[in-house]
Amino acid sequence: MKIKHIFLFIILISIVSCGKEEPVLEIGTFVEFSIPAGLSTLESHYFVRENVPILYDSQLSASGIDKNNIELFVAGRATLTPGSGKEFDLGFIRGVNVYLVEDNGKRNELFYLDLVPIGNKDEIRLFNSIVDLQDRIVDDKATIETKLEFNTPPPSTYEFRLNMTFAVFAGG
């Protein structure tokens, strides 16, 4: 009798845990910026790009998704890579934070990696935050601020590309 209850409990847990919700839409964008050689390791360095296209309203309209059915619009995935088709080691970077800056100056963290693993790397994959961005994107554009901290000063001036994907989740 106990085995039957354990078996039923395992089946119930399996069914409940299978309900992973998938986004109804993913929206991609990127920003590019350069960092000069020799920046300090004692300070954080900020790189701001205004009017970055995040085509939330346009993509919803084009996909035929009713905005009233949207539950969440959140950061999905992001990678920091060398820009301009170049290759170089990103091992000098210690930490990355990416923010969406609202018109009133409020910063909303989108992506982060506080301690980048030491070693050679050609891309840095960031964790996402779960801030709902539905009312924070104005006219399909946003100001994106990237904060970098370094283990060692950048040995040269480098171009970077931050690739970002945002996820739209709809309700019932």
Image (tube, rainbow, N blue to C red):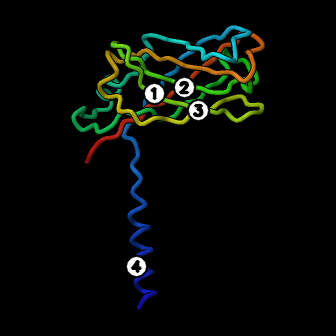
Residue with the mark numbered 2: 97
**Three-letter amino acid code of the residue under disc 1:** Glu
Between residues 140 and 92, which one lies in front from this camera angle? 92
Determine which of the numbered discs, if any, sits on residue 8 in the image: 4
> Which of the marked residues, 2 or 4, is nearer the chain's N terminus?
4
Residue with the mark numbered 3: 113
**Three-letter amino acid code of the residue under disc 4:** Leu
Answer left or right for 159 relative to 18.
right
Mark 4 element type? helix
Real-space CA distance between mark 3 and mark 4, rounded to the nearest whole angstrom: 41 Å
Real-space CA distance between mark 2 and mark 3, rounded to the nearest whole angstrom: 6 Å
Q: Is residue 100 above or below residue 128?
A: above
Identify the residue at image location x=30%, y=41%. Answer: 170
Residue with the mark numbered 1: 109
CB of mark 3 within 8 Å of CB of mark 4?
Answer: no
- Picture quadrant where residue 70 is located: top left
> Which of the marked residues, 2 or 3, is nearer the chain's N terminus?
2
Determine which of the numbered discs, if any, sits on residue 127 in the image: none
Q: Residues within 10 Å of mark 4 (few under 14, many from 20)?
A: few
Identify the residue at image location x=59%, y=32%. Answer: 113
Q: Nearer the viewer, mark 2 or mark 4?
A: 2
> Which of the marked residues, 2 or 1, is nearer the chain's N terminus?
2
Mark 3 element type? strand
Mark 2 element type? strand
CB of mark 2 within 8 Å of CB of mark 4?
Answer: no
> Where in the figure is residue 71, as x and y percent of width and height?
29, 39
Q: Residue furthest front?
A: 42
Identify the residue at image location x=44%, y=31%. Answer: 166
Q: Residues within 10 Å of mark 2 (few under 14, many from 20)?
A: some
